[in-house]
Amino acid sequence: MKFQPYFVAYAQAHGRAPAAQLDFDSTRWPGGCMTGFILWIAKAKVSFRELHPAAFMPGGDVIHDFTAWGKFLESFPCEK
């Protein structure tokens, strides 16, 4: 199975391989296995906006610098 790069970053932040993270999240949130990823990426976007406002379209919430976004996600931690 091939995983989207942002999900790979999410799994790595939690110290797991993507397939193992999906299994873990499926157990933790049986009604919505992507809940953990959605919560993590939403928090990451808020932090990214604070540190890199120029990476967003003017006056909006749309990221246009995906290179910076991807690099940011690679180091964004998980909540313990």
Image (cartoon, helix red, strand yellow):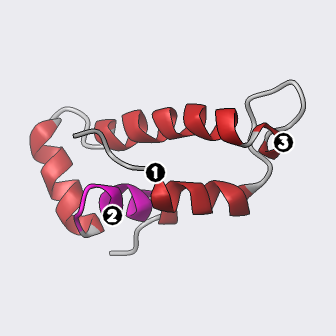
Determine which quarter of the picture holds residue 14.
Answer: bottom left
Q: Which residue is mark 2?
A: 12
Determine which quarter of the picture holds residue 47.
Answer: top right
User: Residue 15: x and y, percent?
Assistant: 23, 63
User: Residue 63: x and y, percent?
Assistant: 74, 43
The residue positioned farthest toward the left in the image shown: 27
Q: Is residue 34 found inside the magenta-colored segment of the image?
A: no
Image position of 14 with respect to 47: above or below: below
Quadrant showing the C terminus:
top left
Which amino acid lies under the numbered mark 2 shown in the image of this protein?
Answer: Gln
Task: Say which element carries label 2.
Answer: helix
**74 sits left or right of 78 in the view:** right
**79 sits left or right of 69 in the view:** left
Q: What's drawn in magenta, residue-wise? A: 6-16
Task: Say which element carries label 1.
Answer: loop
Which amino acid lies under the numbered mark 3 shown in the image of this protein?
Answer: Ala
Image position of 66 with respect to 44: above or below: below
Quadrant showing the N terminus:
bottom left
**3 sits left or right of 54 in the view:** left
Q: What is the C-alpha distance between the residues marked 1 and 2?
A: 10 Å
Toward the viewer: 65 or 18?
65
Q: Which residue is mark 1?
A: 76
Q: Earlier in the sequence, mark 1 or mark 3?
A: 3
Q: Which residue is mark 3?
A: 54
Q: Earlier in the sequence, mark 2 or mark 3?
A: 2
Q: What is the C-alpha distance between the residues marked 1 and 3?
A: 18 Å
The residue positioned farthest toward the right in the image shown: 58
